[in-house]
Image: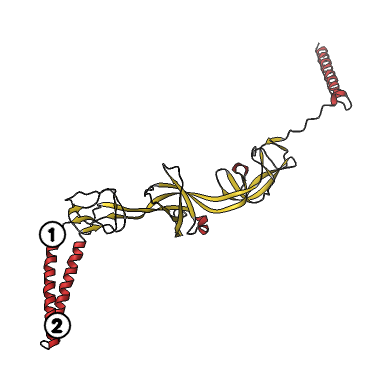
Amino acid sequence: MKSTRLAAIGALLLAGGTGAFLLFSRSAGAVQPGSPASTAPARPAAAPLKVRAVVVAPEPFAEIVHATGSLRAEESVDLQPETSGKITAINFSEGALVRAGQLLVKINDADLQASLERSVARRALAEIREHRVAQLLRDGGTNQQEYDSALSELNVARAEVELIEAQIARTEIRAPFDGVVGLRSVSLGAYVAPTTRIATLQKLENIKVDFAVPEKYAQRVTPGSPITFTVAGESADFSGTVYAVEPRVDIATRTLQLRAVCPNADLHLRPGTFAQVRFTLGQVDDAILVPAEAVVPGLADKVVFVLADGRAARRVVRTGTRTERVVQILEGLQPGEMIIVSGLQQVRHGLPVAAQ
């Protein structure tokens, strides 16, 4: 019985092996060279990558630096008294135009006026005495020492008058220049001290524009360069001229401070206004400009892809000024070449491309 079972198992294994061999033989025979099943169609060539491209052409280009600035008055001063006292007169209207030397505020000087009258009387008496002694000296009726004493008294009396007049002048606040006086912060009868600010005075015939440019432009900015700027609420552009350049670069911001002046005859521009400044560094008549998205930055250089003979070619370029939309190419491109501006993530050197 045991031998019969072993014989049956052997027969089954032999039959399974024979079937597997026949199946493998049929499968192998189906792909024999020369058979119809072995001739599969070839894979079609990859279609060119569709991209957008533009032709490089020279065009005029102004190298402009954009900066933010502030407007300043041509001259500006806080009106403050030189001495303490009570205000006895205010001779200006708020927001009015005043002239240089005009008396704006008067502080009580009654005691000084009384001292001035006394000193003037003493001076007059000293002048009479000096005149008499001088006459006696010429006639031989006195000596030189007596005359010197009289002359000294006269000089002291004159100095006292000048001193009191100077003290009286300190009780008067006069306009140092033509300008527009601002809002006053005191009233008639108020007691003021040298630290009290009465009002401000602004000279507005010309407006100064303070702004800064990056330090890399330090060698390209000079007095006399024109600027244009805009202010909030005004659609028109205003023009000015740089007249002063700070001799050092700001260490904190690494910028160079500049100051320009702009005519303001109609007093339309006001100090303290925020300004958007455009500063022109130079004009190039035949600049090579490409869209900003066409330039691919690398670790050591910048690259564009040129379309030539239906394929993309990698080209290293040297760039110049960059704006929001275009980049100036200084080296690496020639007029008439076509550069790729879309699909740059898929573009590789030598890849077939088709320009739309």
- At horizontal 21% and vertical 62% (from top left) the residue drawn is 169
Residue at the limit of the structure toward the top, as seen here: 1
Residue at the limit of the structure toward the right, as seen here: 34
| Label 1: which secondary element | helix
278 or 4, nearer to the observer: 278
**Residue 111 appears in the figure:** yes
Report x, y in % for residue 213. 48, 53
Q: Quadrant of the N terminus?
A: top right
244 or 239, nearer to the observer: 239
- At horizontal 53% and vertical 54% (from top left) the residue drawn is 281
Q: In which quarter of the image is the C terminus?
A: top right
Report x, y in % for residue 28. 85, 24
Q: Is 347 left or right of 16, judged from the image as shown?
A: left
Q: Which mark is residue 134?
A: 2
Picture quadrant where residue 168 is located: bottom left
Query: How many neighbours does mark 2 have within 10 angstroms: few (below 14), some (14-19), or many (20 or more)?
Result: many
Q: Is residue 290 above or below residue 205?
A: above
Count of numbered badges drawn on the protein:
2
- At horizontal 58% and vertical 49% (from top left) the residue drawn is 61
Report x, y in % for residue 156. 16, 74
The residues bearing labels 2 and 1 have C-alpha atoms spaced at a distance of: 36 Å
Q: Residue 110 carries which label?
A: 1
**Residue 300 appears in the figure:** no
Q: What residue type is labelled 2?
A: Ala
